[in-house]
Image (tube, rainbow, N blue to C red):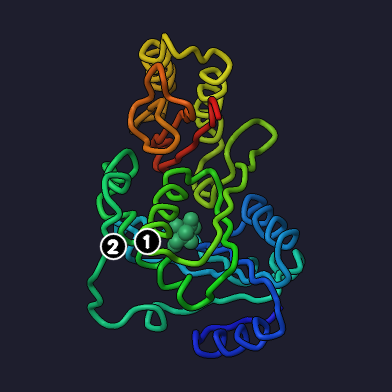
Amino acid sequence: MKNFTKKAQLQQHLQSLRAGGAVIGFVPTMGALHAGHLSLIEQAQQQCDIVVCSIFVNPTQFNDPKDLEIYPRPIQDDIAKLTQAGCDLLFNPDVAEMYADNEKWHLDIGELEALLEGKFRPGHYQGVTQVVFKLFDIVKPDVAFFGQKDYQQVLVITQMVKLLNMPVKLVMCPIEREADGLAMSSRNIHLTADDRQHALILSKTLNNVKTKFDRNHIEQLVQNARAAINAEPGVTLGYFEIADGNTLRPAGNNTKKVVALVAATVGKTRLIDNVIVRD
Ligand code: PAF
């Protein structure tokens, strides 16, 4: 795997590959890679000739400086995992390579960035669209791969690509889970053994909603789900919603694509998870 820290060098290298007709796949990450990320690399390898992975802990998408400070950065371990997975190129810039001093601009992609996660983490999706815009501009991928675990992020980026007519195809890959159902996340590293057990209430509740889903009783299902999570020791519910899978507004009787989404703090760690209930 070739490792680039400077965008000009990566761009030059990609230009020659593109000139040779290679289809470029891109997996943007913030590192602390787990099987979920590696499944994105695998998908990209199946669909593209060259796979670029970026590792960049983007400061502008953290609204809590403490969260940014403790975000795991096991770069040597990540490089070993990517090499083992057969990733072709790594882009691992520092903050100065990605942002000018005092750089302040954001895209307005509308209501989607203010709902659910956006409400709990104001400015988060502005930081995400800002950095993904920059990364897409540098890598110019044909196809980019994102995990379903950040379902709202996929919708937000889809909306950005649509509004700006960006020539990239987006692929959403399924959530990778531990054997007991916990959604894989770079943040799981912060869970204590007790937290880890309590966190299972999130995937259990989502599965329960999927099994029992009935368009006429959405409110009741939401109430029961919230009650189950609130009853779990050590877990503080942020939100649990059954939403329209395209707009993230509350689902109604006629909603075609339905997704259940949850966010909760388990011990000191904020986790998100979701399940597509009807497609
Ligand atoms: O999902 C992530 O890891 C990040 O939000 C992303 C897309 C790499 C942007 O920093």
Residue 106 in picture, x, y percent from top left: 26, 65
Give the labeled residue for mark 2. 107
Question: Which amino acid type is marked by label 2?
Answer: Leu
Within the image, what quadrant is residue 272 found in? top left
* Above or below 134: residue 72: above
Q: Nearer the viewer, residue 1 or 44?
A: 44
Rendered residue at 57%/48% (across/down)? 172
Residue 46 in picture, x, y percent from top left: 75, 59
Rendered residue at 40%/16% (across/down)? 253
Locate residue 164 relative to residue 190 in the image: left or right.
left
Does the rendering let one see residue 85? yes
Rendered residue at 55%/85% (across/down)? 11
Q: Kindly identify which numbered label has been placed on residue 83.
A: none
Q: Which quarter of the image is occupied by the N terminus?
A: bottom right
Give the labeled residue for mark 1. 129
Residue 192 in picture, x, y percent from top left: 52, 40
Q: Which quarter of the image is occupied by the C terminus?
A: top right
Locate residue 42 relative to residue 236 in the image: left or right.
right
Element class at badge 2 = loop
Marks 1/2 in contact by CB < 8 Å: the verdict is yes
Within the image, what quadrant is residue 251 found in? top left
How crowded is the residue under tag 1: few (<14 C-alpha within 10 Å), some, or many (20+)? Answer: many
Does the rendering let one see residue 71? no
* Above or below 219: residue 49: below
Q: Is mark 1 within 8 Å of ligand 1?
A: no
Within the image, what quadrant is residue 143 found in? bottom right
* Above or below 258: residue 100: below
